Amino acid sequence: MILRQAAAGLFFLLMILSFHISCLAGTTEEIASLLLFVEQSECTFIRNGKHYDTLEARQHIENKYAYYKEQIRTTEDFIQYSAAKSTITGKPYTVTCNGEDMTSSGWLHAELDKLRTRVLEEGHDAPDNNPDD
């Protein structure tokens, strides 16, 4: 009986660990996608009133990510800690895209929503190529 309970407990622990690792992998992929999105956009990144190109924006966000990495558990944390506002002045970062100004946080959250929607659609619309069915 004790052995069965220990096995069940171990199985439960392994399931939780597996889920946690899976979530971390998803977060890492989402962050990488957002960094690529920043770099490949044609937007201007504005930090403390100064304009930056997309490569400089990506480098700055990556530097902040490296600094706050231990505190970041989700992609939303990544946006909050690395790409939302100046830690020195507290002023929100903004982006200008096609003449439209928005907060970088709102811009990245919108892209994250699109990314997650694409992933869900791909998962549900994936063709079943198993000839044994």
Image (cartoon, rainbow, N blue to C red):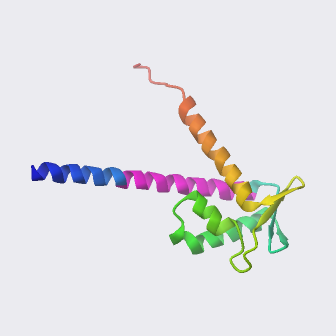
Q: Which residues are magenta?
A: 17-39
Question: Furthest-bottom residue in view?
Answer: 88
> In the figure, residue 56 lies in which quadrant?
bottom right
Q: Nearer the viewer, residue 130 or 47?
A: 47
User: In the image, is 122 to the left or to the right of 13?
Assistant: right
Residue 105 x/y as whole percent:
71, 60
> In the figure, residue 86 lies in which quadrant?
bottom right
Above or below, comparing residue 111 to residue 94 in the picture: above
Question: Furthest-left residue in view?
Answer: 1
User: In the image, is 55 to the left or to the right of 120?
Assistant: right
Residue 94 x/y as whole percent:
79, 64
Residue 26 x/y as whole percent:
52, 52
Above or below, comparing residue 24 to residue 113 in the picture: below
Q: Which SS does the magenta portion mostly show?
A: helix
Residue 19 among magenta residues: yes
User: In the image, is 111 to the left or to the right of 98?
Assistant: left
Residue 132 x/y as whole percent:
40, 20
Q: Residue at x 49, y 25 (%)?
A: 128
Q: Residue at x 41, y 19 (%)?
A: 133
